[in-house]
Amino acid sequence: MLTNLQDRITSTQTTVLVSSFILGLGILTLPRAVTDETGTPDGWISVILGGLVAMLAGSLLAKFSQCFPGKTFYQYSQDIAGKWIGNIICLYGVGYFTLLASFEVRAMAEVTDFFLLPATPKEVTMGMLLLASAYLVVGGLNAVARLYEGFLPITVILFFLVLFMGFKEFDVDHLRPVLSKGWLPVLQGVKTTSLSYLGLETMLFLPAFMDKPRDSVKAVVVGIGISMFFYVLTVIIVIGVLTVDDVVTLTFPTIDLARSVELEGVFFERYESFLLAVWILQIFTTLSLCHYFAGLGLRHVFANENWFRPFVYGLLPVIYGLGWVPTTINDMFAVGDLLGYLLLGLIVVIPLLLLIIAKMRGMLHANHS
Amino acid sequence: MRITPRTLLMLVCMVLLCVCLGGCWDYTDLEERHLQVGEALDLAEQSEEETKSHPMIMVTAQHIVPEAIASQKGGQQQKPYTNFSTTDISVLKAWHKLFERYTQVPIVSHVKVVVVSEDLARKLNLNQLLMDYLRDTQIRYSCLLFIAEGRAKHILEVGEDVPAFELVDMAKNRERIGSILPEMSLQKVSAKMAAKSSFLLQMIGASEGGKKVVGAAVIKGKSNKMIGTLNPGEVTAVNWLTGETRSDMIKGFDDKTGQLVTVETSEIKSRVRAQVQDGRITFLVKVEADGELEEDWLLPGDAFEGDLLQRAGTAVEKSLTQMIRHTLDKLQHQYHADVIGFGKKLQLDHPQVWEKMKDKWDEVFSEAEVKVDVHIQVRDYRTKGRKTK
């Protein structure tokens, strides 16, 4: 009822949406986060294992959503748990996406201020991104997906360009010895890396918009696979250039990789600008999709189809304000950790609860047919 | 089209917005910007009271003068750079005091070199001293670090061109020289310091005539302080051990006649293996290279026939082995510092042993046995083979 039937996306678009959502702040901090846990150069194995865990979770979520064809998480949680509890669940989702949006936009402002536009006030960079996001989101999911389809190739080309320039300083010895302390440190790293695939929660919503919902498992696995490829390559090259010991001392190791490269005979330096340019695109994709899901949730809670636009604009000051809540950069990283826990609530606790309630009320069978 | 009040309003807005598109409101001449290209850190005179706990540091910043670089071809005598110095106990604060003399905030994203004086490096922990440079978002991680023999400031004062740029070129000029260490960027230094391993930094000396690479400074991993120097011959040995040399000229003396021979070596390969037996660590170093006989003082010398090529090879093998043995002895027994990276080899070959040893690695390294095997195959003698008496 509440999903605009014209707003359909293809399977390819779903894949792009998933991988664009996943790639965000993590690409800059992941080499440090994972090495902090493992303490060995084996972080890349943890990233692969984490990706497999995320693929499994994403597929389960997609399967779960398929039990309620044509309905988003917001709709079927109300169907299952009733209006009041359903509304609470919806608001949890809205809160999660709003907080995630605010985190991404604040992180973007911090990094831009450090490396790209030190003289520009953060208020301006944040405001610009948010306004662009609102403009995109009111166009509906299809518009969002089309834009992301354009962004992905640009990201791939520029990002790989920067990574491969790092090869000049790459030393494979920095990644060896492999598994020197066994599998235990690697498994410890999986805790961190599987949460870096934050974005698989989109599978609670996207199947409802797909023209072929049957493909949703394939779409999420490929989507996570694309981001896994980015992540593994990043961790390998960053550690191969900067070494394990140094990576754990750096705030944004991936940027320092670009800062370590000096090519002679090329007119410009500062390759981190390229990296940051595509990274901001990827932050924007995460931000606007969060913005969209938050607006969708509010529209659903207040059950009025015409209110989507006002809600999207109304969320702007909320996201902006929440973005300013963390005062120091450590507070900001703490919000990132908090989001990891909130994510577990959204993709593990709530779906399990819904499943149990649905089973008890005997709804699952009827819908499955 | 009818002009409604709404379209009129839009038109006015569009015209007004054009004002914002001027673009030049933030404009500054390149000549007026302070483009900083190098910095030198010296130990300053101790005079003020606040220096009891902290030594005073003199910061010298080098800026380029774009007009002078542009007009250099015209034969004008203006120096293409200017240096400014101030002192403070804080590196950043000293640099900041320089702002008082400028007309603009300096741009530091093109700083190519940081030179630290020998006395400062011996006195202070480099990790503390350089924190500002490692942390700064504008200074690039690829900026090079040097130790100055004597005053660091002098290094940035000697030279025809911009001294900071000359330093970069000198540091990278390793095509046929084996006595120059691979250049050390802030990133590499940071990685070494984070790993608490000892390392070498290129050492630069300056005199009236100019500046040159005078060897290397040994930085101890535990303290991150300089503990000694290696002369160019010893750096050559280190480069052979690490396999960092591309080609080099090595001289030696022929066994039979005692005459001098010089061989140009290329295709230099070095392989280090770590062996652990009953808790004793042995490193097996195998160095191999090809050679060309360039200069020999043998009279008569006939390379067409006989064993001259082989004798030349043996001669340089011997002198090279001697250089390597001498350098290893100095590193193991005088400095107790593994700057060659034997620790990494042990970590690769025996990770468990390394885990136990890594905290006291420099001491273990001093005790370890190193077996060196040098093999140089002299293959030809260029265009002239025979020299008659």
Image: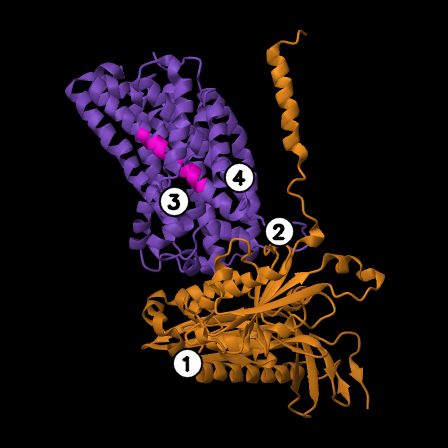
Q: Residue at x 40, y 29 (%)?
A: A317
Q: Residue at x 47, y 77 (%)?
A: B123
Mark toward the start of the polypeptide (2 vs 4): 2
Q: Among the chains, which one is orange?
A: B
Q: Which residue is mark 1?
A: B366
Left-right relation of A281 to B368: right
Could you say where residue A226 lies in the image, as x and y percent from the top left? 45, 37
Of labels 1 and 3, the one closer to you: 1
Q: Which residue is mark 2?
A: A269
Mark toward the start of the polypeptide (3 vs 2): 3
Q: Which residue is mark 3?
A: A48
Q: CA distance from mark 4 to mark 3?
A: 23 Å
Apparent colour of chain A: purple
Helix or strand or loop: what does disc 4 sit on?
A: helix
In the rendered structure, are the residues bearing label 4 and label 3 in contact, judged by CB atoms less than 8 Å apart? no
Q: Which residues are magenta?
A: A95-108
